[in-house]
Image (cartoon, helix red, strand yellow):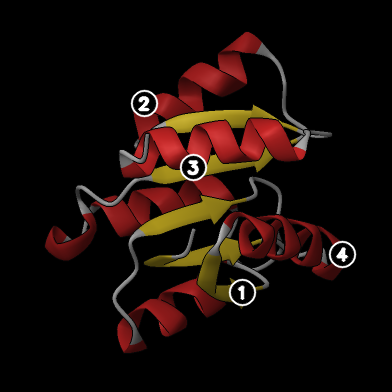
């Protein structure tokens, strides 16, 4: 199965980006963009139409929450699904992320099955 959705994965860890990208490619997503922080991600998004955003919380220059709020403030991205993958596991942190505009949340470490389930759900893939 192959999918044509464009996914951007935003994380300051190149290793984590590679893990996410490899997992998504195994699931059939060939269009996976990468960014090291929110500023880089916004630059990428100005050049490509993004179907789903996967972002970390803790990043330099522009953290995940600021990035999510910035994205949500733009009309063209107000409905774009956002999945946050982070080490922040406290209930208050999850609520803060959801209130900021995150659609779903995965705590690191995660399994490929968890990533698949969340991404497919956000994209409406059965």
- Give the label, 3 or 4, closer to the camera: 3
Which residue position holds label 2? Answer: 99
Is 84 displayed left or right of 88 in the figure?
left
Q: Which mark is residue 35?
A: 1
Left or right of 122? Residue 41 is right
Mark 4 crowd level (few <14, some 14–19, many ≥20, 10 Å Cα) = few
Q: CA distance from mark 3 to mark 4?
A: 19 Å
Residue placed under numbered mark 3 in the picture: 119
Give the CA separation, mark 4 to mark 1: 12 Å
Q: Outermost residue toward the front?
A: 1
Q: Residues within 10 Å of mark 3 (few under 14, many from 20)?
A: many
Q: Is residue 56 left or right of residue 14?
A: left
Q: Of residues 88 and 124, which is closer to you in this image?
A: 124
Q: Earlier in the sequence, mark 4 or mark 1?
A: 4
| Residue topped by disc 4 | 15
Nearer to us of marks 2 and 4 is 4
- Please tell me in which quadrant of the rendered image residue 9 appears: bottom right
User: Which residue is painted at 71% across and 56% down in the image?
Assistant: 20
Dot 2 or dot 4: first in sequence order is: 4
In this picture, residue 15 sits left or right of residue 82: right
Secondary structure at badge 1 equals strand
SS type, badge 2: helix
Secondary element under disc 4, as helix, strand or loop, is helix
Closer to viewer: mark 2 or mark 3: 3
Which of the 4 image quarters holds residue 30?
A: bottom right
């Amino acid at each position: 199965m192959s999918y044509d959705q464009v996914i951007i994965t935003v994380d300051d860890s190149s290793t984590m980006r590679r893990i996410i990208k490899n997992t998504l490619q195994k699931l059939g997503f060939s269009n996976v963009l990468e960014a090291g922080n929110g500023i880089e991600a916004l630059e990428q998004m100005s050049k490509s139409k993004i179907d789903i955003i996967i972002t970390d919380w803790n990043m330099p220059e522009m953290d995940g929450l600021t990035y999510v709020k910035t994205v949500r403030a733009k009309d063209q991205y107000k409905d774009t699904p956002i999945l946050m993958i982070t080490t922040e596991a406290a209930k208050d942190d999850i609520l803060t992320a959801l209130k900021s505009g995150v659609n779903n949340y995965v705590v690191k470490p995660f399994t490929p099955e968890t990533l698949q389930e969340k991404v497919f759900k956000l994209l409406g893939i059965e």
